[in-house]
Image (tube, grey):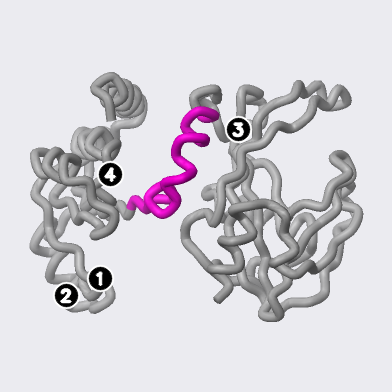
Amino acid sequence: MEAFEHARLDAYFARINTQFRPPEPPASLLITHPLPERPSFVKAVAAASQLRAILPKPKPINASAQREVEKVAQCATLSRGLFTDPETAVDFLESRAAGEPLVLLDVGGYLAQHPEDKEPLAALLDEAGDTITSRKEFRGHVTAGVVLHRPDGRVLTIEHQALSKWLLPGSHVVEDTDETLVGAALRELAEETGTDADKVTLAVDLPLHVDAHIIPANPAKDEPDHLHFDLRFMFRTTADEIVLQEEEEEVTAASWQFADMLVSEPLRSRVLTTAL
């Protein structure tokens, strides 16, 4: 990354810390990929908490970023058994923050898994505003989508009345009630198809795909054309029957389609790979 890009990230996180830094910063442990842009985030975590250790994820690793994060806090070795074995986990946590409030931050990396998405998403996010979860942010805002996959290889699609298209279930985030994007996706799935959260299981913790697309203007809602950043989460289910909700006027039909019939790439490839 160029120096000006690092400076922009540092300034962004500084603004976040100015607004949201807790009055009594807790101890923290940070699990993350040492990627080129990550040192700015690590420094921000250290400014907002008492960062006791960084546990770098093994792949991918950027050597320069690794050296930078090592200047911020001590790096520990992240192993597969560190948090899966209870005694090992307790011993490690007590060695870092015995008797203290502790926040464990596991920062995944959608872009670490899909680096090919970084450039197009970065260019589009530059156009979006700061309130990216608000549907009133017409420079661009996030939505939560569902890829619901059955054992027979089919994926649920719905017919969207306003757009006259067959789409994946999902829609806007409700800022006052949705605590997570996965929760928003599950709520939309239940509202649109009657499929409750207890009938599905999350296949992958991170979004399977982030799709940026333009939504046409809707004069009836006083909405100009704007960008949607649709974070699509994959769930598995053995459910078959779909009950469309009468109060859900935007959905007119539902259908189970074979995953290899999805026309959008790289979504199609990722669904087929994850379904194996």
Above or below, 30 relative to 87: above
- Along the line of sight, the residue nearer the viewer: 182 or 97: 182
- Along the line of sight, the residue nearer the viewer: 36 or 139: 36
Position of residue 38 measured from the top left corner of the image (x, y, whole percent) = 27, 40
**Which disc number belongs to residue 141?**
3
Q: Please state which amino acid type lies under the numbered disc 3.
A: His
Instruction: Report if residue 86 is visible in the image.
Output: yes
Instruction: Report if residue 24 is visible in the image.
Output: no
Q: Residues within 10 Å of mark 2 (few under 14, many from 20)?
A: few
Q: Residue at x 59, y 53 (%)?
A: 266
**Which disc number belongs to residue 88?**
2
Question: In the picture provided, is 49 more to the left or to the right than 262?
Answer: left
Q: Are marks 4 and 3 in contact (CB under 8 Å)?
A: no
Q: Please state which amino acid type lies under the numbered disc 1.
A: Phe
Q: Nearer the viewer, mark 3 or mark 2?
A: 3
Q: CA distance from mark 4 to mark 2?
A: 27 Å
Magenta stretch: give its range. 107-125
**Which disc number belongs to residue 35?**
4
Question: In the picture provided, is 216 more to the left or to the right than 226?
Answer: right
Residue that badge 1 annotates: 83
